[in-house]
Amino acid sequence: MDGRVISDLRGRLRVRVEPVRLGAEGFDRLSATLMKYGGVKYISYSRLTGSVLVLYEDAPGKRLFILRTINEFEEQGIHPVSVTEREPLSVGEEAPLPYNPVWVLVLKKLFLPWPARIALNVFAAVPIVLKGLKELLWHGKLNVEVLDAVALSVCFGRADFRSAGTLLFFFSLSGYLEAWARRRSLSVLFHSLKGPDEKVWIRGKDGKPQLVPESSLQIGSEVIVQAGGLIPVDGVVESGDAMVNQATMTGEPLPVHKEAGGAVFAGTTVEEGEITVRASRVGGSTRIRSIIEYIKESEASKSGLQGRAERMADAIVPFNFLLALATFLVTRNVAKAGNALLVDYSCAIRLSTPIAVLSAMREGNESGILVKGGRFLEELASADTCVFDKTGTLTEARPQVSEIVTFPPFDRTEALRLAACLEEHFPHPVGRAVVNQAKREGLSHAEEHTKVDYVVAHGISSTWRNKKVLLGSRHFIFEDEGVPLTPEAERETERIAANGESMIYLAADGALAAVIAISDRVRYRARETMDALKAAGVERTVMLTGDLTATAANMAAKIGFDEFKAELLPDDKAAYLSALAGEGRRVMMVGDGLNDSAALSLARVGVALSDGSELAKDVANVQLLNGRLDALPVARLLAERSMKRIHENYWIIVILNSVFLGLGLLGVAGAGLVSFLHNGTTVLVAARASRPFLKPWERLAPKPAEEDE
């Protein structure tokens, strides 16, 4: 797309394009690309004038990137050249490894004469030297690339071809090990994220909603996505109105309003409302692409410890040059001065730290723990307060209807049939319990109601037989909607609450129709999970719930919480987490529902269960893939071990390399031996970083079969 710059100020750029060629979907894709990769803070588009206004961070290369991205649009403006689409699907097992340097060395020794090996080494050294020169002269940096280039140049300059060959071999071996460890770790991440073939709602040929496998979607399919649902396709909104969370695509936390004609993308989540999307891309072209983007972002999300180690390692490089200069001035010995350049701390630190992080992420996946980046391992290891949502998190995602109390003129069958008809539209554990109970009793429920509206964290509203019907929490029914609570209903709710059961309320035409009691079994090993977390150093455990105080007290005592907060709204949960942060607490929040997303995003590290809502899983930094609460102490232990090993590796690198450096400067060891010891340490530390963190008996034990019944 040819754009014309009509305004160009620092951090502010306005480009005129042809309105007909951009369109709504094209602008949405352009926005997503720029917001994610271009350091853009704001973007707007005028269809009337065809101008795109971009406010961006004033940094080198940003302006050119923005202009290039706009110009790279295809004629219709709906397919920008993004990082994902420029690169092949090179993740996990699909990523080719470089040649094994050990075999290359063996073949060279066996089949090539010494002069030919020297020539090959010179050829291999040229890119390294050029890269070092570029870093020094072009970027003005004095880092490990410069040190490597100078070390090779010194070896070749004094005709020490053996030391130069040793250096090149270990450079290659380090790169090979890093690629191998990355490939192995990312392969596990990639395949664990592919997941099963999910079910989605589509609008059938008769206009009625149908539940079909996601793999059956085709271009042109009309997919219905409701509040809390993940959008499974790229496409254009055909009808409806919704607020869509596009954080997975743009990195922006605030939801975006979408209505008819707007473009939406696979992997984003509907927070409020309902939309019907006509698919323009389906299947692997959407899901796999979003998986690859997630993995790349996970790699980029480094721990604070990793970043500090790398900065410290880079800071050491100038001292190598100062030490070499001082050695030469004192000894006038070029060989000894050159030895100071053969040992660097940065290479081993830069290699071992990310390998340790990726190895921990891989090992976590093997135990059903998905950690979305290195810095969240650090937060997991240091959390001192653990806050849990109750329903669906501490209790299983398969609650059951234990009792239905009805009030005239409704009878039990009619109340259950209507509740199931409303709840089947929303994939929440309590809703599934109602629908499953209706199935067990053989109750069919025709779609007699009008459009079903979901009020986030409150309940459902619709019209049935010309009557307004409501289904939801006590707060929603009696306070928000003003339905009167009769003395008889009050007695029944108190009786059910005393048993520690949850309740949802059904109202019709302004009167209470039924109270549905939900018995939700406590998750497997919930009490043991609390004990293990406290033993691991978590100082404070808190349960948050919207349930009545009596119900919450019963549950908190059963599981062993230090404290609990009951009768909370989603905003109250978020406010409580903000208060904990204000106290200086390092909070880990565990939740599963749509109404937990705000609290999950406020915590230092958010943890979601795999059977929770899509939005909660999207917002969370850690996922428990098998839905097991007892995976949380394992995640904590894994995080602590990985951080401990990174610390240990750092000091191993510093101490050993300092010893080798001293041996070289004293003349005890020659250049070849110093290089061998230094690079051998790098390889050994990298191998140590990839070793398992957990003992076999510390891993997540299989769940007994009877617990799944």
Image: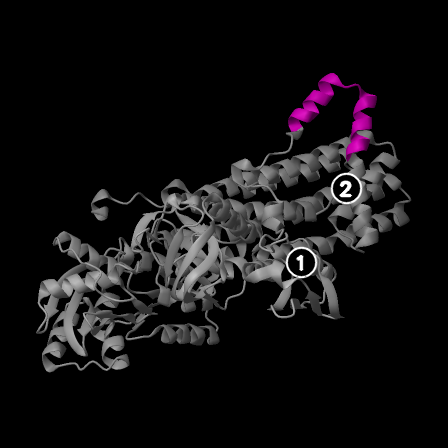
Give the residues in magenta: 102-124
How crowded pointer 1 is (Cα within 10 Å; few <14, some 14-19, many 20+) is rated as many
Quarter of the N terminus within the rendering: bottom right
- Which residue is rendered at x = 65% and y = 41% of the image? 682
- The overriding secondary structure of the stretch rendered in magenta is helix
Q: Which residue is mark 2?
A: 342
Drawn side of residue 47 relative to residue 464, left or right: right
User: What amino acid type is highlighted by mark number 1?
Assistant: Ile
Give the mark nearest the N terminus, 2 or 1. Answer: 1
Q: Is residue 358 above or below residue 10?
A: above
Q: Is residue 386 visible?
A: no
User: How many numbered discs?
Assistant: 2
Q: In the image, is residue 123 part of the stretch drawn in magenta?
A: yes
Give how far apart the Cα atoms at labels 2 and 1 are: 46 Å
Coordinates of residue 464 in the picture (x, y in percent): 21, 69
- Which residue is rendered at x = 55% and y = 39% of the image? 183
49 vs 624, nearest the viewer: 49
634 vs 290, nearest the viewer: 290
Q: Which mark is residue 70?
A: 1
Coordinates of residue 614 in the picture (x, y in percent): 39, 57
Q: Which mark is residue 563?
A: none
- Which residue is rendered at x = 26% and y = 53% of the image? 524
| Image quadrant assignment for residue 465 | bottom left
| Image quadrant assignment for residue 401 | bottom left
How crowded pointer 2 is (Cα within 10 Å; few <14, some 14-19, many 20+) is rated as many
